[in-house]
Image: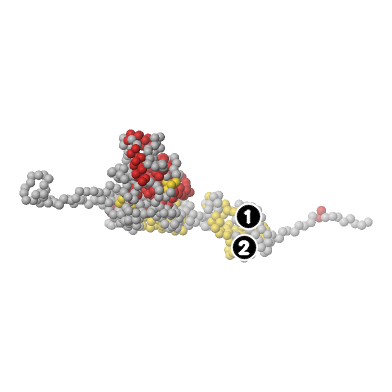
């Protein structure tokens, strides 16, 4: 409370005129097309949201957020009640929270280098969503001390998002609430969640998990966040509000100019919130709960209701005599009409999902699947349902993903009720996996599609060397074996090659004598697996050795796809040199 009191004194000491001018200058310099009115509130020429992301697919469901702007670096600082800088806790970032942002940036630089995600953007979003996890109230593992839960999204002043997680994350089995320091709604966390601290769990209340999830969320669609247009689109997809965009951009610019680390739990909490009609009201005790719309930490949220007048009893004020007053209800009043039930949304009418013709999902490692997953949403009567969001998720132990590297994609059904997933790209890991289609915002059985990644193939192998491969007994071959793999005449890269020293061309059994390779312990090995061609289709085998058995041997190389090559190896003693008669000393006859 001392921090809040100090900040109120500081704000009160600055004249309205100076504050308005300063905020206007800050807004104009930090966010495009932003100005400020006479009260220092942000305004824009066009304050309409510009994101195509629907609330149920946004990170936050367009939940409320903090509206405080960064502290001003005024040449005439406001008076303070203490020796410390009043902006230090506002501008500083709690140590664990800051570490989570930087680790998320590092991971995204590796996983999606073209996104160019700055950790300062995560800090800016974390500031406006939860006040940096309520001033850094986290345990040593980065989990918030008490859950941060936003108001229920029941359509009463907010988006209408019915429960999607049975209350697992938000404690609400009727509607969804935004959860955690980055304020993810459960329906988005279900596909965007990540394990950022390596504990095997994806917890929206953990700042490491939430920061990494936010990074991946902002980097979807191959956005390049160094481009202002992509940056704006990414932020608006997080929370679809032009004012939200301007506020985040202001904090982003502020953090880019420099910030500092502060101890966990010492950060100050913002005061203003986007849905707060009493702007500037002081947060309730505990601070973070009121300032993020959360309940008491750890408590299950209850329904949120708007203030309303008590219902009339329906009885006249003077039942004993007539009244001409228009305010007096009749003796036999007509009962008030019931509020009409809103018509069902397209999503409400979905009964099941059907395969829209997808078969044969097979691709070679590294290739794009020729066919796409296609799903049709239908009513109970089998009629098509358009304008329904379908979530496609890659499930199983696989490195296959949708184009762009994401494991999850959301697509809206067309007028025929069909949603087509983005193209699937096979990874290097072979085997089967599943693509699961589910309806976003409605609990109906999912539809699974089986997919298979097969290994890379080559239909031909050729030796790149012309030298005959020979060796003396007990020696080693001077030249290595090098081959080139092709598929229909084109280079076949990353193809597995098996090399086996066989008994003969007619007997492919592994030989028990003659040439051999060596394993890591120096023991003889006559079959090699797991070797792959390089980007040019080339493969050089390890050095070959020979035992004491002389003879002619066969090294057979094979590939998936039918490539085969037999190489002859000879083990023989070195030929003895024959003296040249012309060089032998002559013996002269005796006289």
Identify the disc placed on residue 583: none
> Which of the pair 419/341 is nearer the observer?
341
Query: Residue 537 vs residue 443: left or right?
Result: right
Where is mark 1, residue-wise? 480
Identify the disc placed on residue 523: 2
Residue drawn at x 53%, y 52% as measured from the top left: 493
Q: Nearer the viewer, mark 1 or mark 2?
A: 2
Rendering quarter of residue 5: top left
> Which of the pair 361/324 is nearer the observer?
324
Residue 209 % position (x, y):
42, 52
Q: Earlier in the sequence, mark 1 or mark 2?
A: 1
Residue 201 % position (x, y):
42, 57
Residue drawn at x 55%, y 59% as measured from the top left: 529
Residue drawn at x 31%, y 35% as measured from the top left: 38
Residue 354 shows up from this direction: no
Residue 434 shows up from this direction: yes
Q: What is the quadrant of the C terminus in the image?
A: bottom right
- Report, in whole angstroms, how far the alpha carbon at label 1 lies from the one at label 2: 19 Å
- From this viewpoint, which residue is outermost toward the front? 82
Residue 253 % position (x, y):
41, 40
């Amino acid at each position: 409370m001392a921090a809040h009191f100090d900040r109120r004194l500081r704000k009160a000491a600055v004249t309205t005129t100076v504050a308005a001018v300063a905020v206007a200058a800050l807004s104009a310099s930090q966010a495009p097309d932003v100005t400020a009115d006479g009260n220092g509130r942000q305004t824009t020429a066009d304050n309409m949201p510009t994101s195509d992301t629907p609330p149920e697919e946004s990170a936050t469901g367009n939940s409320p957020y903090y509206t405080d702007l960064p502290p001003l670096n005024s040449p005439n600082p406001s008076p303070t009640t203490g020796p410390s800088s009043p902006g230090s806790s506002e501008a500083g970032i709690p140590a664990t929270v800051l570490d989570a942002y930087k680790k998320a940036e590092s991971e995204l630089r590796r996983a999606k280098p073209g996104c160019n995600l700055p950790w300062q953007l995560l800090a800016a979003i974390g500031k406006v969503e939860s006040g940096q996890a309520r001033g850094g109230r986290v345990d040593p593992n980065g989990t918030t001390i008490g859950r941060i839960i936003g108001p229920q999204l029941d359509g009463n002043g907010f988006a209408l998002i019915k429960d999607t997680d049975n209350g697992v994350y938000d404690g609400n089995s009727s509607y969804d609430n935004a959860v955690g320091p980055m304020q993810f709604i459960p329906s988005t966390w279900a596909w965007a969640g990540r394990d950022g601290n390596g504990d095997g769990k994806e917890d929206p209340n953990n700042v490491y998990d939430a920061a990494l999830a936010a990074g991946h969320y902002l980097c979807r669609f191959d956005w390049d966040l160094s481009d202002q247009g992509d940056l704006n689109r990414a932020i608006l997809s997080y929370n679809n509000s032009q004012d939200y965009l301007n506020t985040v951009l202001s904090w982003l610019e502020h953090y880019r100019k420099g910030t500092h680390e502060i101890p966990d739990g010492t950060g100050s909490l913002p005061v203003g919130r986007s849905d707060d009609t009493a702007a500037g009201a002081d947060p309730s005790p505990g601070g973070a709960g009121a300032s993020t719309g959360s309940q008491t930490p750890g408590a299950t949220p209850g329904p949120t209701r708007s203030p309303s007048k008590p219902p009339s009893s329906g009885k006249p004020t003077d039942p004993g005599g007539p009244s001409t007053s228009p305010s007096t209800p009749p003796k036999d009043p007509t009962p008030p009409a019931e509020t009409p039930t809103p018509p069902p949304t397209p999503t409400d009418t979905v009964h099941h999902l059907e395969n829209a013709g997808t078969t044969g999902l097979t691709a070679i490692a590294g290739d794009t699947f020729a066919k796409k997953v296609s799903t049709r949403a239908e009513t109970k009567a089998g009629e098509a349902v358009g304008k329904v969001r379908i979530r496609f998720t890659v499930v199983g132990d696989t490195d296959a993903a949708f184009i762009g590297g994401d494991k999850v994609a959301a697509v809206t059904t067309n007028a025929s009720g069909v949603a087509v997933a983005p193209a699937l790209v096979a990874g290097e890991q072979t085997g089967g996996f599943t693509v699961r289609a589910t309806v976003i915002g409605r609990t109906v059985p999912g539809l699974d599609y089986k997919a298979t990644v097969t290994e890379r193939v080559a239909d031909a192998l050729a030796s790149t060397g012309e030298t005959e491969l020979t060796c003396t007994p007990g020696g080693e071959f001077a030249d290595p074996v090098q081959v080139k793999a092709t598929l229909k005449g084109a280079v076949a890269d990353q193809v597995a090659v098996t090399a086996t020293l066989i008994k003969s061309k007619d007997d492919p059994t592994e030989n028990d004598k003659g040439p051999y390779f060596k394993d890591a312990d120096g023991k003889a090995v006559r079959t090699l697996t797991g070797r792959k061609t390089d980007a040019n289709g080339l493969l050089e085998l390890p050095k070959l050795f020979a035992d004491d058995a002389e003879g002619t041997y066969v090294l057979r190389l094979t590939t998936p796809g039918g490539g085969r090559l037999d190489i002859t190896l000879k083990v023989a003693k070195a030929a003895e040199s024959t003296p040249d008669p012309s060089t032998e000393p002559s013996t002269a006859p005796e006289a």
